[in-house]
Image (cartoon, helix red, strand yellow):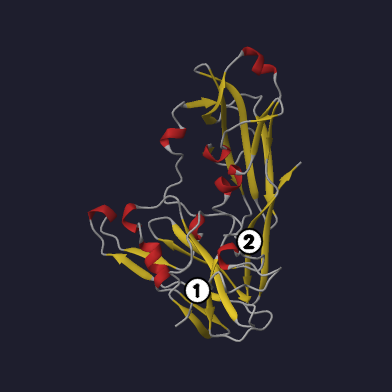
Amino acid sequence: MRLLVSLGMMIALGGAAAASETRLSEGVSLAQGSFNTGGGMTVAAELRRTSTGGTALCGVWAESESQAAYTAGEARRVLDHASVSVGGRRIAQDLGFLPKIAPRLDYAGAPARCRLVDLPWRAGLVPEVFLPRRVIQPGNRDTGNNLVRFDPTGAGAMADALDLVPLVRRHIGLVPLSPAARVVEGRYSSGGGLRLAAEIVSVNGRAALCGVWSDLPGQVPQTEPLGRAVLREAVVTLGGRALSVDPGALRRVSARGDYTGAAANCLDTGLRWMPALGHVQSGIALPNIVVHRNTTPRGAQVIRFAPRG
């Protein structure tokens, strides 16, 4: 029987951390799947050398934060029937031992769990994770009589069921952006990017961040669903002070050159509005980060996002 790598079984990398402390490396391999009703899952895995010269399979999994009620729990069932192969040889079946974590852009550094596999260690081993296709349930009134399917394609855990800003984030309402709105943009190293237009104004006596954002053309499938996740990493400042606000909750609109008049939603910054704030300089710093990393038998792919201008 295959065993989980215990506290006594050390992974021989960088001083050999115990299983509870194992972090995935930059050589992580991804497998992603999506429900046809929206949402999906991602498995991140790699093979590591043990201190005894054997091989351990290490990894994590994540599912979308938002998906249909009738797919709840189905991602874990998919995981239970997943398998891993190396060079066409199956080395693992049932990945239910992997820990679940929140979706993330880059799984390098994610806290993983490991299991010994029957495979002699050699440098350059790359696991291929296979997620099975599944019919979740027959069509019914809740699904418009359509079948609910899971397929090993798409954006995985970064895909949401609905591209809607939660109602709790939209309570202030919509306002037209003024010509003074700050516009920033960034680009993916694989092509395309995103643009954000926002300003801090008085709404109902509160200082609010009002804005919209757009995907820019030229993106590859790996980056198309990442806009909100990238914006969550942005930092909004007022007078040099970082504000507790999430630009990822702003509305997405079609790309345009001039955002004046665009219908923006507004997010409470936690500050009471004072006229003096209208003269304080605001700033928006987009992140410089890896947004996609995947290693396959054909090589490694790394996609970065970086501010422009």
Q: Is any part of residue 30 visible from this angle? A: no
Residue at position x 45%, y 71% from top? 95
- 76 lies left or right of 207: left
Q: Which mark is residue 218?
A: none
How far is the residue under mark 1 from the one under mark 2? 21 Å
* Residue placed furthest toward the right: 309
Q: In the image, residue 285 lies at what x, y percent?
A: 69, 38
Q: In the image, residue 38 lies at what x, y percent?
A: 41, 55
Q: Are marks 1 and 2 in contact (CB under 8 Å)?
A: no
Residue at position x 69%, y 17% from top? 279
Q: Which residue is mark 1?
A: 4
Residue 234 occupies quadrant:
top right
Picture layout, residue 11 above or below residue 148: below
Q: Nearer the viewer, residue 72 or 118?
A: 118
Picture layout, residue 231 above or below residue 103: above
Identify residue type, mark 2: Ala
Q: In the image, residue 18 lies at what x, y percent?
A: 60, 67
- Secondary structure under the numbered disc 1 in the rendered image: loop
Identify residue type, mark 1: Leu
| Labels 1, 2: front one | 1
Q: Nearer the viewer, residue 51 or 197?
A: 51
* Residue placed furthest toward the left: 141
Residue at position x 65%, y 18% from top? 277
- 87 lies left or right of 73: right
Q: Is any part of residue 70 visible from this angle? A: yes
Q: Which mark is residue 108?
A: 2
Q: How many marks?
A: 2
Residue at position x 54%, y 53% from top? 225
